[in-house]
Image: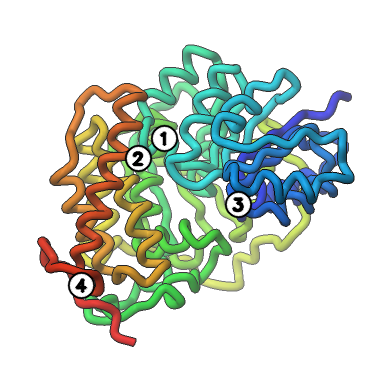
Amino acid sequence: MKKRQIAILGSTGSIGTQALQVISEHSDLYEVYCLTANNKVELLAEQAHRFKPAAVVIANEQRYDDLRRLMDDMPDVKVYAGRQALDEIVEATPIDMVLTAMVGFAGLSPTIHAIKARKAIALANKETLVVAGELIRDLASEHHAPILPVDSEHSAIFQSLVGEDHNPIEKILLTASGGPFRNCTMQQLERVTKADALRHPTWDMGAKITIDSATMMNKGFEVIEAKWLFGVKASQIQVLVHPQSIVHSAVQFQDGAVKAQLGVPDMRLPIQYAFSFPKRLPLSGARLDFFAQKLEFFEPDLTKFRCLALAFESIRKGGNMPCIVNAANEIVNRAFLEDRCTFLQMSDIIEQTMARCTFSATPDYDTYVATDAEARRIATEILKRSPGNTGNPEIPLRNPVIP
């Protein structure tokens, strides 16, 4: 049987490395066609030596020579660099599925190219649907490109809907761990550090997503993603804080029945399910012990976690507003990781960017690109005037972190 050819966009990140573990376990079924990374040339070269893809792409063109030197002993592997190379490689004829595991807005363009090339999409880059959900939905329908969710929550919803094709969804129950600051007061949140935020209680993820989980912006993005993936309104999506991360999400139907997918926190499971759907393949690892812990559920505090409220607000506004939120969030997320703003300042800056950025009710792709650039510029300007930087703040930003 012909092995399914997989292209992994973002192979050096958390999702990408776990996807390679899945492929290793099922090397009789899957083969890596292409691996890509943004900057991590050493790890990318190491992965290429192990999996022997047809091609590798480094998005940062300045690292091309470094990657080329590391690949000198593999003349059969084509080495490319740049954003255009990412767009072009996903169109390669042998590819059966593209795993989009890049982080941020950068994942939008190659995903569009893959869809237009009629590739199956294993979607782990949530920003693609956050920024341009309507566009992606329409393109996938036009080009008959299936989109299979890889986020644990959306995979759980997808699994709960199998066999329910003609049964309307009454409500989606989207679970959230609550992150490391679920029980913190506002006063405590004023003093948290990036080290605190990076200590996620249940999941092992990249730095950007871990910070988004701590602010609950990650959950806000997942609400937007669920709207487009499953064709529901924001009012039909309820966020449940579930610290144990055992119930990965659920669907409530019009008869009141609720179907959920449960399991230990292991991202390899949703990755593998996207690869193998509709089959379930063996997977090594821990199994769920129902006697090990109780399952708890709480309402999210939208005052403490303002980012989640802003995400809901962006859905209600529609148009390019989610794109504005995503761009501003990428700026403040990086600033927090670099100690240039505090935890609570992140939501303040996002909110002010939403108020200032040009709104479009009917955006197209060019609008999204322009919106992303404008929102980043505005968020950066506000950030520079925040406490801890030069100038006076224009908005009532929170107190800086106290060492």
Please, what is the three-letter code of the amino acid marked with disc 3?
A: Asn
Q: Nearer the viewer, residue 367 or 143?
A: 367
Q: Residues within 10 Å of mark 4 (few under 14, many from 20)?
A: many
Residue 240's place in the image compared with 138, above or below, is below
Q: Are marks 3 and 2 in contact (CB under 8 Å)?
A: no
The residue most toward the top is 142
Q: Are marks 4 and 3 in contact (CB under 8 Å)?
A: no
- Residue located 55% across and 72% down the image: 293
Circles 4 and 2: CB distance less than 8 Å?
A: no
Relative to 38, does residue 144 appear above or below in the rendering? above
Element type at mark 2: helix
Estimate the spatial distance between the alpha carbons at disc 4 and disc 2, rounded to whole Å: 31 Å
Q: Position of residue 243 (x, y in %)?
A: 45, 67
C-alpha span from label 1 to label 3: 24 Å
Horizontally, residue 47 falls left or right of residue 123, namely right
Q: Could you say whether the residue bearing mark 4 is in a helix, strand or loop?
A: loop
Q: CA distance from mark 1 to mark 2?
A: 7 Å
Q: 134 above or below 203?
A: above
Give residue 337's quadrant in the image.
bottom left
Q: Earlier in the sequence, mark 4 or mark 2?
A: 2
Nearer the observer, 367 or 68: 68
Image position of 199 (left or right of 67)? left
The disc placed on residue 129 is 1
Give the residue number, with chain letter if any, for mark 4: 387
The reply to whether callout 1 and callout 3 are in contact (CB within 8 Å) is no
Residue of label 3 = 39
Residue beneath disc 2:
224
Whichever of labels 4 and 1 marks the residue nearer the N terminus, that label is 1
